[in-house]
Image: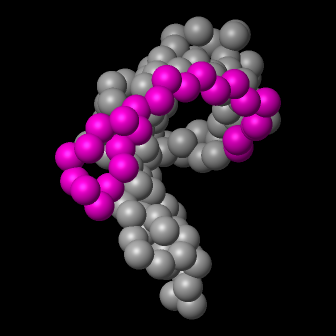
Amino acid sequence: VRVHNPNALVLELKVEYHSSLQIAADLALRTGLGIPVTVPILLKELQLSGTLRVEVDLVERRPWAGTVSLSFTTQPALDFALSLVGAVDLAQAPLLGNALRSALHDCLAQQMTWPQRLELPLERWAHPLDAAPRMA
């Protein structure tokens, strides 16, 4: 626990997460010729570990936490299985699989590492003006 601001609580937690969740998405890529290509992918068996920074802005009314910000202090260790939806198995195309895996890994790691953070506006959710989570 670190105290930099008397109205905030900052925790740095060692976390390890293993998920059986499967995420289907369209991955937008740009070829060497500048031509955009969309590739349907399936991401599964997500595992990550690292030090998670949790910052809670304290407020004087329920829910007593205004905003909770989440980010990793350094790039987390990240692993996942990746396959193309309805197409070739990436095990059969190792160069393509490695390139997609590397690009996705770099993108995810950058979005989850400080100063990037996921902000959860708990105080707004607890009151009439609801808002969705956002990346800051």
Quarter of the image holding residue 81? top right
Residue ID at (65%, 41%):
40
Picture quarter with the C terminus: bottom left
Q: Nearer the viewer, residue 49 or 84?
A: 49
Find out whether residue 97 is within the magenta segment: no
> In this image, 104 relative to 2: left or right?
right
> In this image, 87 relative to 136: left or right?
right
Residue ID at (54%, 42%):
27
Residue ID at (26%, 44%):
3
Q: Report the magenta residues as a range.
A: 1-24
Picture quarter with the N terminus: top left
| Residue 1 position (above or below residue 119) | above
> In this image, 26 relative to 65: left or right?
right
Residue 74 % position (x, y): 33, 25
Task: Residue 20: tell me if it is visible.
Answer: yes
Quarter of the image holding residue 112? top left
| Residue 47 position (above or below residue 114) | above
Residue 63 % position (x, y): 55, 71
Q: Nearer the viewer, residue 80 or 55?
A: 55
Task: Residue 100: tell me if it is visible.
Answer: no
Residue ID at (70%, 35%):
42
Residue 21 % position (x, y): 76, 37
* Residue at the limit of the structure toward the left, as seen here: 4
Find out whether residue 3 is within the magenta segment: yes
| Residue 2 position (above or below residue 94) | below
Q: Nearer the viewer, residue 14 or 77?
A: 14
